[in-house]
Image (cartoon, helix red, strand yellow):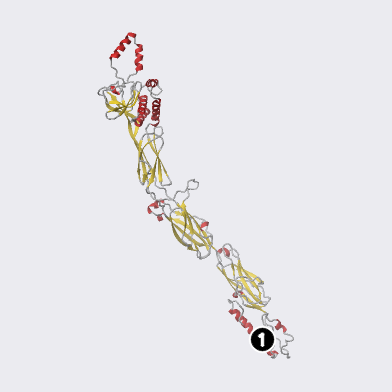
Amino acid sequence: MQLFSSLFLRLRLLPAGGLVLLIAVLLLVPQVPPSQAAPAGSDWSRAAGIHAAEHFVGQYRDAGGQVAYCTDFERLSPENSGGYGDGKSGGFVRSDGSALSTAENAALSYLLHRWGATADDATAASVQLAVWALTSPGMSWDSPGMNDILRAEQLPADVVERARSMTRTAFNEAGPYAVHIDLDATDAGTVSAVIEVLGANGQPAAGLGAAAKLTGPFVLAETAASTWTTGEEAHRLMLQRTGLGSGSITVTVPRTPAAGVQWLAPSSSKVQRLLFASVLEPRDAAAAVADLPAFQPAVATRTSAARTHPGASIHDVLTVGSAPPAEGSSAEPAPWLSVPGSDSPVSVEVVSTLWGPLDAEPVLQEAVPEGTPRVGEVTTRVAGPGTYSTADLVVPSPGWYVWTESISPESVLPAEAAPYVLGWQGQFGIAAETTFVPWAPNIRTQLSAGDAFLGDQVTDAVVGEGFGPSAQGSGSTITLTMYGPLAELPSPTTEIPADAPLHSQTSVPAVNGSQSSEPFAAFTQPGCYTVVATYPGDEHTDPFTSAFGEPSETVCVQAPAPTQSPAPDTKETPGTPAADDGPAAQAAPPHRPELAQTGVRAEVTAGAALVLLGAGLACLRRGRESTRRVSGSVPC
């Protein structure tokens, strides 16, 4: 190719005669413009491109289908060459001897690699313009030489603008390249791989073929392909776990344009050289896909009863989930571990141990104190978050009971998931896991006498059982309340009659064991008296009240027997009371019946009365002994 503008400039400088002679010579010598067919022996012909006003702007193709672009705009087209020699490779040197810089070689290589093989005419024309801008002296963009060409050829504006854009992109996305892989595990058991192929300036490079290879228990998600062409945005692959274990992903870009090109030199130095390919080199990167993180289950519990009675059955209510993140972290708890490739969560055994009875409320601490008594343990298999209930255990006696829970990795199913589950141990003494069984005291009492006379005093023998440590050490007392006099022997009842008169009270300490009370007040009236033992209870001990009228707590009081005086030797009319019954008659007990006059002698009558009185008292005593635990009247 020759520049017509240069030719015309020379013609203007010739004298008129010389100019006429030169024109005649030119008319006689045949010219071979670039747009005409190649002479015999040329292996290159025009392919995709645009036939512009004066030049063909596009690519050439040989008989084998190889595509190439012209480099030296000021020289003749490839059609004027008798042939091309062996190819050359490396950094390109312009026809004026100036070498392309590394960045220019890299951009030229990228340009040929990304767009060089196009079959589109407009794209091929844009590539040719960009190649001339990089390889021809004085043809860089916005130079006078390039501007002259664009005006002369009158190419479509979009072809020119596309060529400019290709040049900018080639510089921006040229190598040397680096492959970057960013992995991020998701909650769904997949791993996201974000892959970028970055150019020398750190920007994503488009148009490069890439391929991914996986190792370990991973496959690509159904929608993902293992090969792709890079774009201006990062490429994302979803890796699906198929099992437990670690693996890797390797991304290879086997053909990245290096800072060099391949070209052919013609047999004639007057013909343009042909650029036909980039110098390519592979780039790759690998990233390890981490194994699943260790999973930490956790259990929050509460006992089924905060307070109950001895012999009751209780159980533990388990709220199972994942352990919360470290304090101060904003992360959500990890999902429950499932076996990759299945929808089945792993299961673990929660061992719940019930400790007790304890004499005091347990104190919160990390470990179970040495020597703590244990009721038993129950095992509950759990598979995923949720609420579970343990089997029952019986609390046998008063005191405090507290649950603790533990999880051992050895209990994990399936067994291959055991290395991925951390053990867990709950604290000792958590309030929500504590059950209290109050102490239930029993008080047995026995009055010192079952019969008494006016003026006597009695005491109470008290036997206390079932008092807890808090009651015995608190100064609590058992109140002994005596009611009477009562008109008759009372029957045992749980209710104290509203009209029962209060006689006196005394008290003893609320302790386990035997003790004797202080005497009750002296008896001033005949009748029956009974004692009720009362303990009010406290936070840890139940109240107690004995029955009213217990035989062992009842005493009957009578007046002392009167002293007998000699009877006067007089006769009384039968059926007529004695003139003066005397002190003995006045002192007779209220329940004692009157003796009727039967016409016998007074001495006999008095004697008989004494005999009957003695027999009645004996009968009363025998009746009281036989009715200590039987309600009703004395059978005499």
Quarter placement of the N terminus: top left
Q: Quadrant of residue 59?
A: top left
Above or below, 426 against 462 in this view is above
Above or below, 328 against 82 in this view is below
**Other residues around mark 1 within 10 Å, as few (<14) / some (14–19) / many (≥20):** few
Give the x, y percent position of residue 501.
67, 72
**Secondary structure beneath label 1:** helix
Give the x, y percent position of residue 169.
40, 30
Q: Nearer the viewer, residue 426 or 156?
A: 156
Q: Quadrant of residue 450?
A: bottom right
Q: Nearer the viewer, residue 357 or 66?
A: 66
- In the rendered view, does 125 fall on the left or right side of 534? left
Q: Is residue 441 visible?
A: yes
Give the residue type that dot 1 points to.
Answer: Leu
The residue pinned by badge 1 equals 610
Q: Nearer the viewer, residue 400 or 66?
A: 66
Give the x, y percent position of residue 462.
59, 71
Furthest toward the left, the residue is 41
Above or below, 54 against 400 in this view is above
Quarter placement of the C terminus: bottom right
Q: Is residue 368 visible?
A: no
- In the rendered view, does 601 fall on the left or right side of 59? right
Give the x, y percent position of residue 188.
42, 47
Above or below, 171 against 3 in this view is below
- Picture residue at 34% right of the left edge, 17% below the top: 4
Furthest toward the right, the residue is 579
Picture mark count: 1
